[in-house]
Amino acid sequence: MDRKLDQSDEYFFRIIPLVAIVSLTLGAGCSSPVQFQKARTIASQNTDASGGGNDVPSHQGTPPSEPPNQPATPPVMETPPVVVAPPVVVQPPVVVEPPVVVEPPVVVEPPVVVEPPVVVEPPVVVEPPVDEPTTPQPPPDVIPVPAEKITEEFQQNPNGERADILFVTDNSVSMEYEQARLGQRFTSFADQLRDVDWQIGVTTTDLSLGPHSTNGKLLRLGGRSKEKILTPRTHDLEKVFRATVQRPETQGCSGGYDCPSSNEQPLRAIIDVIRQRNSHNAGFFRDNSDFAAVILSDEDELSRGPSKATKGEDVLNAVYGAFGVEKAFAIYSIVIEPGDTACLAEQNRTGVEAYFGVLLAEAARLTGGSTASICQTDYAHLMARIGDQIRRLINSFELKFAPVASTVEVQLVPEQEISFEVVGRRIKFARPPVKGSKIFVTYEKEWEDELEPSGFIVSE
């Protein structure tokens, strides 16, 4: 059965050729005008076959019967399938991985050690002691230990008492009268030493580079060309002594270059005499003989006793270094005694300044000697006292330790009744023990007071 094509079917058959053209162009890859024209021709033919009318055979239901007088309808061209181009595969962009950031290791700070605060103890308040009379009690559990007793043995010189005596006289311009007084009273001095085997040497306080310097050398005896040592056997003894101690350079000084040095050094002179004991002064220091030095000066060591001046301990060290402790030694100083302002004023009236003999007095005290005033008008008593003290020095013995005086006990063999005194480390007898006597001294020593003479060195 025939039916007319409705308007929608007509439109369908009109649009098919156009779709075919586009499909062939895109799907067949028409890349030239020829191909495109061919497709267009086919489409046109299809259009013409449709009659350009709106009536088209129905394609639904039972196919209609062909009219008797109508030509056969050409076969419908099957539209080729639309070739769909595959989608363009867009490669995804290469993802560049960012570099791995390595985090630095975390530094763990050590925990801060907090020092505990210093606890300051409050000061201990010490209550002042109450002044109440108390009886000291020994500590409990302490047993008193008896002090150690020491015994030393000595022997009186079998050859009798011997003394080597050095006079150190100040030969500066102000000493003319004092030298004369000393020389005039030599007999008073010598009378105290009648039983003593003594000898005397004389030097001066001038140790300068001037023309009158002695530099520790013994002077030649006045009126004698070669002798330097005075003994009890010296002819015209007192006169020779006076001529030796009264210095011509002192009397004839006019205040110029020809004067002796005014920088007196009596202590240094003693040391220099000891140093030359085996050369210029050979024969003065004898074995088994004690040693005494008598100083006469109106000034101190180096005039005022400065810090660089020689001191008593320097002299004592020199004696121990040369002779050990076997030789008794003492210094006797005739000076302006410290504090004696009247004597100082008297000495200054000469026009030459004088000074207290501070170091010289200290040296006498240190060695167990004594001091006397230079201002005495008569040296008779002074010289006699020094002579007696030298005799007592000879009759003394030096202990190794400083003793506790109250503990000293003395035994003489053979037994003798002789009094004694303790002066420092020295035991002094009132008179000499019998020649060859043995002397035993027992005592308690003072703590840490040992004498060590081996440490002293005096070079020649």
Image (tube, rainbow, N blue to C red):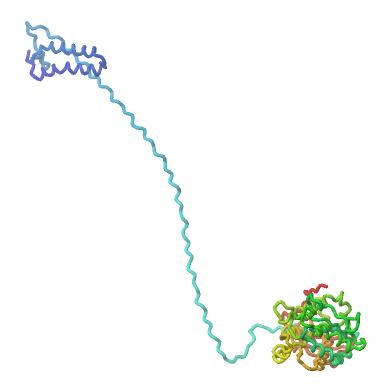
Residue drawn at 48 percent across, 68 percent down = 117
Whether residue 53 is visible to the viewer of this picture, yes or no, is yes
Residue 313 location, x and y as percent? 75, 79
Q: Is residue 201 left or right of residue 443?
A: right
In the figure, 76 relative to 273: above or below? above
* Foreground of the two, 77 or 64: 77
Residue 94 appears left or right of 20: right
Which of the 4 image quadrants contains residue 70?
A: top left
Q: Position of residue 350 (x, y in %)?
A: 74, 88
Would you say 351 lies left or right of 5 here? right
All told, the count of numbered labels is 0
Q: Is residue 66 left or right of 81 when viewed as pictured?
A: left
Foreground: 82 or 353?
353
Quadrant, the C terminus: bottom right
The answer to which quarter of the image holds residue 184 is: bottom right
Work out whether residue 368 can be spotted: no
Between 64 and 424, which is closer to the camera in this rendering? 424
Q: Residue 243, located in which quarter of the rendered image?
A: bottom right
Question: Where does the image place residue 173, in percent across and percent down from the top left?
Answer: 77, 84
Residue at x 29%, y 25% (from the top left corner): 88
| Residue found at the far top of this picture | 69
* Quarter of the image that includes the N terminus: top left
Residue 399: image location, x then y, percent:
79, 83
